[in-house]
Amino acid sequence: MGVTQQKKLGQAVRSNLFCFVIPSAVERISLKQKRISTAILNASSKSRKMKKITTLLLLLFLASSFSSKEIITEKNIKNFSLKSTDNKVISLEKYKNAKGFIIVFTCNKCPMAKLYSERLNKLYEKYKSKEVYLMAINAMDTVAYKEENFKLMQKKVAKEKLLFPYLQDKSQKVAKQFGATHTPQSYVIWKNNTGKWIIKYQGSIDDSALEPTRANNYLETAVNELLQNKTVNNPNTKSVGCRIFYRGEIAKMD
């Protein structure tokens, strides 16, 4: 991992640590876990070398607490319409020639999600000519997380030069339809013989957020298999990142 990427990751994790947890009034992460996280961050200030090590440990510690285990494939996805950051309404049915879609649930502040912006741009460019379209969806609760509001979504698009539609799922209905639990979490939906959209892959984009050149590209492999009319060999992988908390379900949390 290069120095620039290490610095970027360190800054993202230190400045966005509590994107991984719900606000203090309704938090699920124990005080002990927070103290461990804080201790890791404090230790990282002692030396440059230690910063690199402890930043990685922190990311792994947090990610291990927020991983998706639910298997959701072969589920039918109904058409949806959401507003994009360019103020256009985007829906599945508007893509008349689409064979499939890559749907990525992401957000503005999650350190893990920030590492994938460039990779998502490349996937968008690679597959749009093959009639497979990528779109990102922000389903974070804007009441709990002010930094996930629409204006800041627009700023993210401009700053990170995102090429694909970035949609706001303010009601969280689309995220619930997919069963999304984390950011970033990716899905591939494919049109079947009856014209319905079916989830064929769900999980992580790849297995190396820090070193993309060494990654196993699970999402890309799934799309390639579908384009070749093959069955997806690995349709479910574990995704890690920031938890999506659904509005109105706080009382049900442990």
Image (cartoon, rainbow, N blue to C red):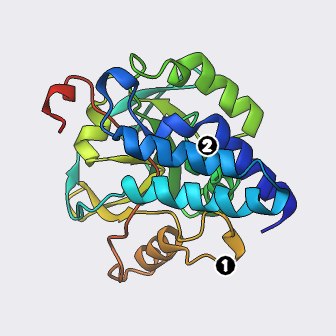
Residue sitting at 66 percent across and 35 percent down? 15
Q: Which residue is disc 2 drawn over?
A: 164
Cα distance between the residues tagged 2 and 1: 24 Å
Image quadrant assignment for residue 203: bottom left
Residue sitting at 72 percent across and 49 percent down? 10
**Nearer-the-camera pick, 236 or 6:** 6
Q: Secondary structure at mark 1?
A: helix
The x, y position of residue 156, in whole percent, is 67, 31
**Nearer-the-camera pick, 144 or 50:** 50
Q: Earlier in the sequence, mark 2 or mark 1?
A: 2
Residue sitting at 38 percent across and 31 percent down? 22
Residue sitting at 20 percent across and 23 percent down? 248
Q: Secondary structure at mark 2?
A: loop
The answer to whether one can see residue 240 in this image is no
Left or right: 158, with 24 as reference point: right
Quadrant housing the C terminus: top left
The x, y position of residue 60, in whole percent, is 52, 61
Query: Is 176 rendered above or below residue 204?
Result: above
**Nearer-the-camera pick, 30 or 17:** 30
Q: Which mark is residue 214?
A: 1
